Image (cartoon, helix red, strand yellow):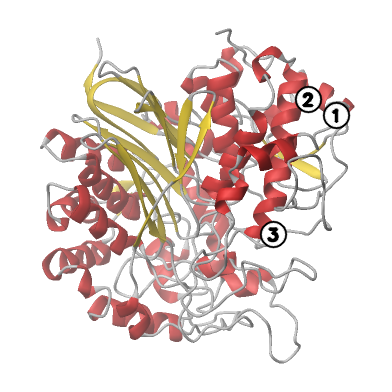
Amino acid sequence: MHTRRLGLPLALLLTVGLTASPVAGAASTGKVPVATGYGGAVVSDTIESTQAGIDVLRKGGTAADAAVAVAATLGVTDPYVAGLGGGGYFVYYNARTGQVSTIDGRETAPRAATEQLFVDPATGQAYAFPTAVTSGLSVGVPGMLATWQRALDRWGRFSLRDNLKPAIAVAERGFTVDATFREQTRQNQGRFAQFGSTAKLFLPGGQLPVVGSTLRNPDLAATYRQIARDGIRAFYGGDVGRDVVATVQNPPVAAGATIDPMPGLMTLGDLRAYRAIDRRPTHVDYRGYDVYGMAPSSSGGITVGESLNILERFRLSGMTEAQALHHYLEASRLAFADRGRYIGDSDYVRVPQQTLLSDRFARQRACEIDQTKAAPGAVPPGDLNGSGQCAPAGQATPGGNEGDHTNHFVVSDRWGNVVSYTNTIEQLGGSGIVVPGRGFLLNNELTDFNFTPTQGSAPDPNLPAPGKRPRSSMSPTIVLKHGKPFLAVGSPGGATIITTVLQILVNRIDLGMTLPEAIAAPRASQRNAAQTQVEPAFLQLPVAAGLQALGHQFVVRDTSSLDPSIKISPDIGVASGLEFDGRGKVLAAGEPVRRGGSAAAVVSPAH
């Protein structure tokens, strides 16, 4: 298969975003973004979390054991996108059975929530997004800890107590603040200062943490110890849970705070009632590869899968670069239209998953791609009852809010088990509220619901309801070839997660890039809008002019959705992936630059 690098030399691919991003990449932090070897592998955001996973693997733990150790450690070293206050989706390949399984650990709305959750009763209008985010009202019932326990019950060899030990040690001794962590704190400085518990932990002396200093979190170490001793009931109904509920219902504003955050509705009964759910994965066959993803409440598996089904109608490898990327962008535009109309929490709405992932529906949608020009804006959802011929139906409708700060990591073990796990507290810094004395931030996951109906006269599948999970874009993915693992991949990035995973799969399978090249390549994200979000490096590609000639309009986003005066990195996603050669060797690859770079490692490096 021929190799394409989108018109740029590999050197530029591996430095994507370097000049635009406010922080340097992996090389300046001691991280290694690519590793090759045997016996198991980990790719995650921080050196400490990757090492925690490797240590568990070397002690004989499974990929599930190592994943819990990685996730718990990320709660210490990457606390603005991970931790006990959040949730996520866990995809697992079981080498013994050859089956892919998933766990839905998404947060839920409290039982007191209604469809009007984010509507101001005084005005009848939706709350402003920043107001809703930084409040107790945005906090969903966390699913993180329940997911860890469920994964260990199904696939672990060690106890939760054992798998929390690495995170406890890191929380006690602390980790070194790098430029990425300081920059993320800067983006949240105004919000964090509003809450005494948050400022105490992340703004030492009221100032940004200094690069090179050590940040310790003894409160989180103690919380992990209590959970290790008492089990997850300490969180789901016990002392830790009581502290969570008290914080949600009465946010701990600092003296001199300039905001009056809305209280939330969560109760201890909501925590006691929470369950992580075993779900069947989504599945599509793409050019002979079996692609497994996350079913609703995430929209990721269906939307990636539908996009791939549409693209399979075309031979991308035989196209010019402009035509291949044009088809990628238009396929995701169509799939996002269907996502907005049809996908929500499948326990509350009927999601037509079988139809959306059918070849007949893909043919119907594929023939709506005009090879000579881009659609001028949002397109309508497809007709589920169509004949399989071109049949656009209805009116185009906008999507909802979704944060763009998450984390994704991948793990494999000596037996061939594989984990692809995306988890989050939603916005960078979540709700901005640290639970006093507990050392972790609470999510703002409920703002992933649509605040008001978005689908015109059609029902909106993503409005709040008691116990409902807000629609997610998280897309942890495992790809099999002839029944054996070929790839495991995923990314953070809110709704851009879907397009990042899709673009990496197209880069690797269709365009002949290596996995490190596919991850490093400049990104473009079309989500059924008039403009396509791109990274600055994408605009440097020679192919960009060809796409613009087809009518594609590009936009770089580099300001915070919570405060447009705050500049942020224009990067799209922070992917991590594993590739298996079928003979025991694994290639572990992450980001060389984005968000400070990834940390990749293997149990036994190849020589």
Based on the displayed image, in which of its 4 quarters is residue 548 positioned?
Answer: top right
Q: Residue 224 at what x, y percent from top left?
A: 21, 63
Q: Which residue is mark 1?
A: 548
Left or right: 346 in relation to 50 = right
Q: Which mark is residue 544?
A: 2
Left or right: 232 in relation to 463 = left
Between marks 1 and 2, how big is the CA–CA gap? 6 Å
Residue located at (48% from left, 56% from top): 208
Q: Is residue 102 visible?
A: yes
Q: From what the image shows, is residue 113 above or below residue 527? A: below
- Dot 1, crowdedness within 10 Å: few (<14), some or many (≥20)? some
Q: Secondary structure at mark 2?
A: helix
Residue located at (56% from left, 44% from top): 497
Depth order, front residue of 121/337: 337
- Dot 2, crowdedness within 10 Å: few (<14), some or many (≥20)? many
* Type of amino acid at the residue the image marks with label 2: Ala
Between marks 3 and 1, how big is the CA–CA gap? 28 Å
Based on the displayed image, in which of its 4 quarters is residue 236 positioned?
Answer: bottom left
- Dot 3, crowdedness within 10 Å: few (<14), some or many (≥20)? many
How many numbered discs, if any? 3
Q: Residue 121 at what x, y percent from top left?
A: 69, 90
Q: Residue 158 at what x, y percent from top left?
A: 12, 49
Depth order, front residue of 189/358: 358
Q: Which residue is mark 3?
A: 341
* Type of amino acid at the residue the image marks with label 3: Arg
**Is label 1 in contact with label 2 (beta carbons under 8 Å)?**
yes
